[in-house]
Image (cartoon, grey):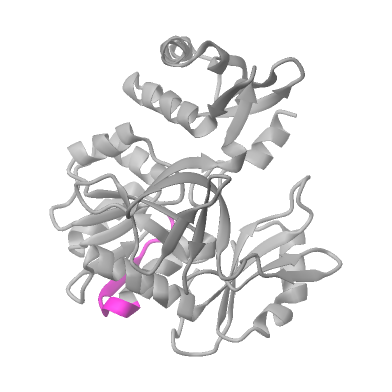
Amino acid sequence: MTINIDWTSEETHVLFNPRLPHKELEIIRRYELKLNSYKGMIWVMTSGVTQTQKSLKFVGLTKRAFLCSAQGVVKHLSINSHDRILNPLPLFHVGGLGTMARAYISDCQIFHQEEWRLEKFVRQLTEKQITITSLVPTHVYDIVERQISSPSSLRIAVVGGGAISSQLVEAAKQLGWPICPSYGLTEASSQVATAIPNKNELIILPHMQAIVNEEGFICLKSTSLLDLYAYLSETDVNFMDPKQEGWLITEDRGIIEGSIVKIKGRNSDFVKIGGENVILPILQSKFNDVRMRLGYLQEGVIIAVPNQRIGHEIQLIVEGEKSDQLEKVLKKFHDLVNPYEKIRVIHFVPNLPKSPLGKVLLGQLKQLIG
């Protein structure tokens, strides 16, 4: 998917995965003219129709918002005209679009490889003497699993698109990869806080104001924030500005200490089990760490399922079939967690549904297991 963006024009772009179901593509075509009436806007689709959500959700970001974000990242990571960027992310996602905006701001060269193929990616890094790239946790896992060392030219590998375990970060660093974890969201035109090489702390970027409200949610204010949401259904389109006096209340809980933000997880990641607070990403991270240490290649996703007696119970969905090695992984995992955090039920599915960035689509996954 090739996209040419004139960052100084009022041309509007409506971006989405071209492999969407036919029904969703028809809805987008029905309202594309309406979206295009907002000049200088880039509309990025973030979610499709599910059993619980009956409309397509688009985030409306101005080109000015993207350039504001890019300026913050360029300053924070000292990107300059001598850098060479390789983008392996799709251009219908803010991660990929953000690399284009940074290349424009810094006047550096950029190359794209939208379809993830590890061997081709590493070859391009070397042949083109790439200095900066952007990855998601799935990419890093592939690199570590194959034990591929980083090319010497690479000085920054920003990792976004979801939480990444500290063990996976350290494993990649042992192979020489200059991993810089980041926290971002579509509504902020990509990054909000990013680590610098050889550090893991998420530093709030210079263009962004961030606070934590009384409920513990991270709130953001910046020119890089969205203008509007657009909700497209079969019968109509609705627009909504979610900001309150310029502030966006995110769904993420966290702690801010000076310029450092620590992410606890999304609101939906917190559940009660027998009166105890359980944070699902922490359990997922522990499971992933055990899986990697023991060389268990089948991917597993931890979910919380309502339970009338104790509130919720922990279940595991595994890609593939049952194996003896899984029993070893479960035993080690259960040694690391509290009794109420142990896995009670295991499901096996042929394939885990994923987004183009490798994120597991939990809504579709839960439909698979009923």
Displayed quadrant of residue 70: bottom left
Residue 322 percent location from the top left of the image: 54, 15
Q: Is residue 185 left or right of residue 179?
A: right
Residue that appears at 30% across and 41% down: 143
Whether residue 323 is visible here, answered yes or no, is yes
Residue that appears at 69% across and 17% down: 310
Between 265 and 60, the one nearer to me in the picture:
265
Query: Which residue ends up furthest to the left in the rendered image?
Result: 152
Whether residue 318 is visible here, answered yes or no, is no
Q: On screen, 337 above or below 196?
A: above
- Residues in magenta, as a range: 104-115
Query: Which residue ends up furthest to the bottom in the rendered image?
Result: 9
Q: On screen, 124 above or below 333?
A: below
Quadrant of the rendering where the C terminus is positioned:
top right
Q: How many marks?
A: 0
Between 259 and 49, the one nearer to me in the picture:
259
Residue 267 percent location from the top left of the image: 59, 42
Query: Which residue ends up furthest to the right in the rendered image?
Result: 235
Q: Is residue 364 left or right of residue 297?
A: right
Residue 187 percent location from the top left of the image: 54, 63
Residue that appears at 25% across and 63% down: 77
Residue 188 percent location from the top left of the image: 49, 64
Residue that appears at 73% across and 73% down: 29
Q: On screen, 203 above or below 326?
A: below
Q: Is residue 240 magenta?
A: no
